[in-house]
Amino acid sequence: MATKAKRQKTTNQKPAPSATPILSTPPTATPGSSQMAEDFLKLTDALCTDLRQLKFVDPVAYVYNPLEYAKEPHEDYVRKFCNSPKEVLLMGMNPGPFGMAQNGVPFGEYDFVINWMKITGNVGKPPKEHPKRQIIGMDCQRSEVSGNRFWTLWKSLCQTPEAFFSHTFVYNYCPLVFMMESSKNITPPMLKANMRDPLMNICDDFICKMIKLLGIKVVVGIGKFAEQRTQKALKNAGIEDVKVVSIMHPSPINPAANKGWNQIVIKQLTELDLIQYYKPS
């Protein structure tokens, strides 16, 4: 009996249409803005252009890019806190569904984004939205454990965002969110090679440019994936003067992270001789 070839669903990452903003509040003025921040945003614009050319097929059914639909708060974050050279880059993997996916800020726990960093801006919608993973922007008050743990640590150590960001910037290796038809999350390393390799080539190139622009001396992977991917990207680019290490990821999926993540990471930072950057002056 003849068999029919299975047709693959294709999800194209296209520019977001002119979405109706969820919030009407304009971004706040950013007096700390500098040429470095603008140069960084040019890199992210070029990154988005490259990512739009990629095609994702089953099991990927939905692709969100918060650099596009959450462009205003993301730019506010960059202009406020990426306006000077940095010694340390804290590198995550990709956005969480209730953090950066909602507001464009890495590890974007809403309380810290709004009340500690004072980030504002309109947020639109991705071109194709899963009904179980709707984007409600700065109105999203669902806590994300990873983001809550992450920013609680830095606030406890540095007290103010200005003190924390004076030496450090926080970003993700990949800005995209991937989901199955069921809404289940797909992380970049879970992608099939025909989708994963082109994606990582683009992201590798971006992070090397970011590291050069900011003058980064140490990349701290939040988890082993970010560490290993950064090492590979720098090696392929011939960049040898940047140290790459890692600290434990705050995800609740990791049982060890549920047993005092803050204290574990403080110990790791001390052993890595990085704790010096996170003591209030």
Image: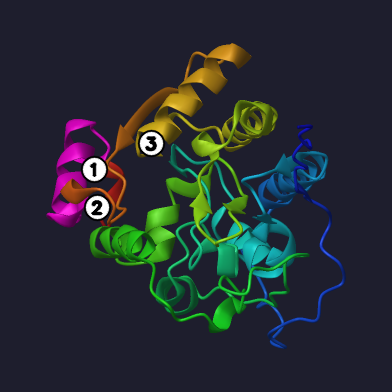
Q: Secondary structure at mark 1?
A: helix
Where residue 266 sits: x, y (%)?
18, 47
Name the residue at the right extreme.
18
- N-term mark: 2 or 3: 3
Q: Which mark is residue 279?
A: 2
Kindly tell me whether residue 33 is visible in this rendering: no
Q: Secondary structure at mark 3?
A: strand
User: Mark 2: few, some, or many residues within 10 Å (few <14, many ≥20)?
Assistant: few
Q: Nearer the viewer, mark 2 or mark 3?
A: 3
Q: Is residue 270 left or right of residue 167?
A: left
Disc 2 from disc 3: Cα separation: 17 Å
Name the residue at the front extreme.
1
Kindly tell me whether residue 20 is visible in this rendering: yes
Above or below, 26 relative to 263? below
The residue at 39%/67% (across/down) is 144
Residue at image mark 3? 220
The residue at 48%/48% (across/down) is 169
| Quarter of the image where one finds residue 15 | bottom right
The quarter in which the C terminus is drawn is bottom left
Q: Which mark is residue 275?
A: 1
Where residue 50 sits: x, y (%)?
79, 38
User: Residue 265 in magenta?
Assistant: yes
Asked if the residues shown at circle 1 and circle 2 are in contact, with their CB atoms under 8 angstroms apart, the answer is yes
| Quarter of the image where one finds residue 181 | bottom right
Above or below, 72 relative to 142? above
Where residue 218 sits: x, y (%)?
41, 30
Magenta span: 257-275
Disc 3 from disc 1: Cα separation: 12 Å
